[in-house]
């Protein structure tokens, strides 16, 4: 079963503090809210929170690159261009794709 996600690109904003929940919003270009990466000013470094939001924002792009990579590994492996460990690489790439597609 494929999970449907909000189409990318996504973007992580700047750290917001003050009223409401301190954190970094992750949103899509269509204005959808994807996530709020919460920032506990007593526990986490702000730069880490921003980096986490940026990683979440990169998810649609990373998934697309993994799909392309899996296709390339399959093609090159079948053509005998890649060494035998390519099946391990393909398995790892496909596992990451599956993880991204799982429904909660």
Image: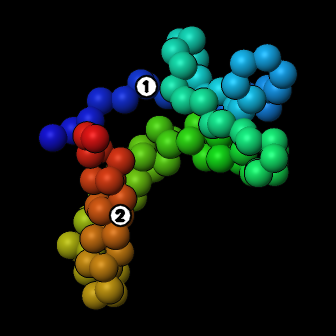
Q: Which residue is mark 2?
A: 93
Residue depicted at 54% across the width and 19% down the height: 33
Residue depicted at 42% across the width and 46% down the height: 63
72 to the left or right of 18: left
Residue depicted at 29% across the width and 30% down the height: 4
42 to the left or right of 81: right
98 to the left or right of 12: left
For residue 32, say whether it is visible: yes
Q: Mark 2: few, some, or many residues within 10 Å (few <14, many ≥20)?
A: some
**Residue 86 at what x, y percent from top left?**
32, 79
Where, by quadrant of the figure, is residue 23 drawn? Answer: top right
Q: Which residue is mark 1?
A: 7
User: Relative to 72, does residue 11 appear above or below in the rendering?
Assistant: above
Where, by quadrant of the figure, is residue 72 drawn? Answer: bottom left
Task: Please count the marks in the image.
Answer: 2
Disc number for residue 73 = none
Instruction: Measure the C-alpha gap from mark 1 to mark 2.
Output: 21 Å
């Amino acid at each position: 079963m494929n999970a449907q996600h909000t189409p990318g690109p996504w973007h992580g904003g700047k750290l917001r503090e003050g009223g409401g929940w301190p954190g970094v919003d992750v949103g899509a270009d269509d204005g959808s809210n994807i996530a709020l990466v919460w920032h506990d000013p007593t526990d986490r470094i702000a730069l880490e929170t921003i980096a986490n939001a940026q990683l979440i924002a990169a998810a649609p792009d990373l998934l697309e690159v993994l799909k392309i990579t899996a296709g390339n590994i399959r093609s090159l492996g079948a053509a005998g261009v890649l060494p035998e460990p390519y099946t391990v690489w393909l398995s790892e790439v496909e596992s990451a794709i599956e993880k991204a597609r799982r429904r909660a």
